[in-house]
Each structure stands twice: as structure tokens, then as C-alpha cells.
Amino acid sequence: MVNMNYVIINSKFRTDNNDSTSNFTYRLGDPIEVSDVAIKSVSIVNAEYNIKAGSNKLIVNDGIADTTLTVPVGQYDITALLTVVKNYLDATYGGVNTLTLEPITNKVKFVTTTALRYGTDPVTSPVGFILGFGDTPNAYYSPTGVSNIVNAPYLPNLQGSNNFHIVSNTLASGQGSLLKNNEKRSIILSVPVTEDFGNVINYEVNEINLNKRHFARPQNIQDIDIRIIDDDNQVVNLNGTNVEIVLQVVIASTLPYATEGDRMGYQ
């Protein structure tokens, strides 16, 4: 008979030396020896800002030199973001600058006294992508030449991350997955971001789709490392909100407190 059990991991009860609720270690009260493990469900708040640290710069060029706007980290709608950019253009270049979202196309239009162009490089100017300038191959600026009237070619995208990826070296036991730029991560489960900012994502995997990890040799587990990363391979900032992960495990050896079907926190 399969000795199926459930382990509840809550970042609220992470080890004392971890400050982050998205990059922490969880210690079971007693070690368990498992032959199979899978994430059954995840409860996580969509608390990552759509303008985040490390992805909050916009390159602006007047045909002579670059300047860089650093957008304060936070959760923005398009109106708030355009206000920040306009204030920067006013302070840096002067004149009259108007930034609008066109009512028919829903694309951003820049009308500026100084002829300008905007960075599209996803590393140095990621806010350019968010504003709708895209990641144009072999083009560092959009448009190529400076202009007083610039229409972003693409729709603005303030959605933020599409997925939160749960990574754990302990649970992966050497198995890995390829994420972005061929960087290998021990991804146990990818959770689609289906809720608006501030709402709780409750994601449960049915039995057929469980990403089960079977260990050739039973693994003795007590400390479980958990890291939650976004599509940019960055650790998600949950702004202090907690995540709960339910593991489905097959106990390799019978423990006195492990009965089939129990859901145990092992805290």
C-alpha cells in the first residue's frame, strides 16, 4: 500500500535566519524519508510590483547623449507611469511634453519640444518595453532617429510576471529545468499569475498533471529550500506576504505519525 502523505510548507514558519518569504528554508519537525514528491497546491499573493528593482530604467536620447530615468519601484497603471515619464522629460529637456494613450489604438504617443528617441534594450531600458517600444532586434532605439512626435509601435504592457516558478534543490534532487537564456533552474512547478495585483492565487494541480519527482534512492528530508522566481529569473518580492505550499509525498519507510491521507505540517 502506498504511504501517501501531505506536507504543508508555510513561509510564515521559515527558519529564523530567513527574512524573505520567497527565498527561505523550511525545517520539518522530524526528518522524513521519501521516494516521491510533488507540489499539490500553492497559495500565493500576487504581490510583485509591475515596475520592480532592476527593471525600472528608461533610456532617453536626444540624438547626442543618453539620459536615464529610474522609475520608482511600485505598482503602476499607464496613467501613473506616463506622469512619471513626463515629469522626467520636463525636468531634463524642458519645453512642452505631452504623453497620451491614444483612444483608438491604445498605444502611447509622445509629443515633445525636444526631438527624442527611446531605448529598447531589455537590460538597460526595460521600461521601454513596458511602454510599448518593444524589444526590436538590432535596434537600440525606437524610433531609429529622433523625432518630436513618437508613436510606440506596440501596446503598453504593465501586466508584470506571467508566471511564478517554484524552485527547490532539495526537492529536485539534481533534476533541473531550462528557464530563460538557457539558465538551469530546479523548477518544481510553474504557477500562472491569474489574479490581479494584491489578490491571492490559489493553484491546485490535479492528480493527472502532478509533476512527480521519483528518487532512485529514498531521500531523507528535513530542511527544504524554497525559492520563487519570476520569468526574468529574479526572486519575486512578495512584499512580506506569505506563501503556502502543499507537498504530496510518498513515505519510503513507515513513521509512527505518518498515516495515509493525513495532511501534516511537520512544524
Image (cartoon, grey):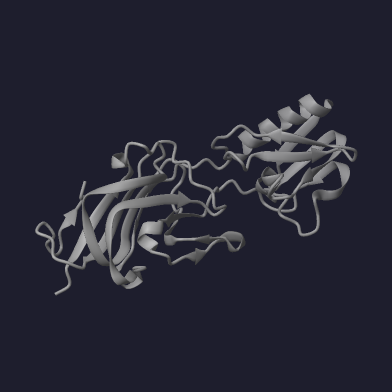
The structure residue drawn at horizontal position 76% and vertical position 59%, both measured from the top left corner, is 137
- Picture coordinates of residue 203 (x, y %)? 35, 56
Q: Is residue 176 left or right of residue 63?
A: left
Residue at the far left in the pictured view? 256
Q: Quadrant of the N terminus?
A: bottom left
Q: Name the one closer to the observer, 136 or 110.
A: 136
Residue 70 in the image: state x and y as whole percent.
67, 34
Q: Tell me if 125 is positioned left or right of 115 in this view.
A: left
With 255 as the anchor, is 153 left or right in this view?
right
- The residue located at (62%, 43%) in the rendering is 55
136 horizontally vs 265: left or right = right
Q: How many marks?
A: 0
Image x and y of residue 234, in percent: 54, 48
Q: Is residue 180 above or below residue 155?
A: below
| Residue drawn at 71 percent across, 45 percent down | 124
Question: Which quadrant of the structure image shows residue 180?
Answer: bottom right
**Residue 241 image-quadrant placement:** top left
Residue 86 visible to an observer of this rendering: yes
Residue 174 appears in which quarter of the rendering? bottom left
The residue located at (65%, 34%) in the rendering is: 71
Q: Nearer the viewer, residue 254 or 211?
A: 254
Relative to 185, say whether 113 is above or below: above
* Image coordinates for residue 97, horizontal then vertical, percent: 79, 31
